[in-house]
Amino acid sequence: QVQLVDSGGGLVQAGGSLRLSCAASGRTFRTYVMGWFRQAPGKEREFVVAISQTGGSTIYSDSVKGRFTISRDNAKNTVYLQMNSLKPEDTAVYYCAVRLRWPPSPPWDYWGQGTQVTVSS
């Protein structure tokens, strides 16, 4: 069982930045594919970005490419999502997730509890 704790959400003005963090339990974090998803009110959860076990490969959704950056620190069992140039349409609950193998296609195996990001115009 893998436990994930998402944090770092908040309220920010359009054009601002936030950094989300996701801390994972377990001694095998380095073997996990990590991803971020988001769900806006009234919408389905959507894929945002994923990073491979070593950090050597990343996949971004078109909606965040060039603005968001995923990174991981395997020594700290933590994955980060740096979000710049935020837009009101980025408002959502953001979830980190674990998949036990590449590629980052459904289904994902474990989920965090989510952290709210609100971008005001």
Image: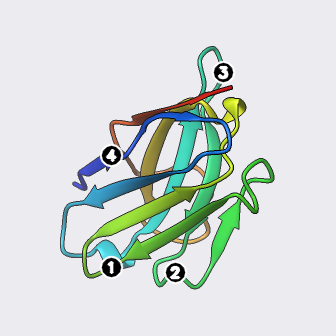
Residue at image x 32%, y 66%?
Answer: 78
Q: Residue 55 has which mark?
A: 2
Q: How far apart, in angstroms, are the residues tagged by discs 2 and 1?
A: 9 Å
Q: Position of residue 44 (x, y in %)?
A: 64, 26
53 vs 100, nearest the viewer: 53
Residue at image x 41%, y 40%?
Answer: 9
Q: How far apart, in angstroms, are the residues tagged by discs 3 and 2?
A: 29 Å
Q: Label 1 belongs to which residue?
A: 74
Q: Residues within 10 Å of mark 1 (few under 14, many from 20)?
A: some
44 vs 99, nearest the viewer: 44
Marks 1 and 2: in contact by CB < 8 Å?
yes
Q: How far apart, in angstroms, are the residues tagged by discs 4 and 2?
A: 20 Å
Describe the element under mark 4 as helix, strand or loop.
Answer: strand
Marks 1 and 3: in contact by CB < 8 Å?
no
Which of marks 3 and 4 precedes in the sequence?
4
Which of marks 4 and 1 precedes in the sequence?
4
Q: Assign the N terminus to one quadrant of the image.
A: bottom left
Q: How far apart, in angstroms, are the residues tagged by discs 4 and 3?
A: 22 Å
Q: Label 4 belongs to which residue?
A: 7
Which of marks 2 and 4 precedes in the sequence?
4
Describe the element under mark 1 as helix, strand or loop.
Answer: loop
Q: Assign the C terminus to one quadrant of the image.
A: top right
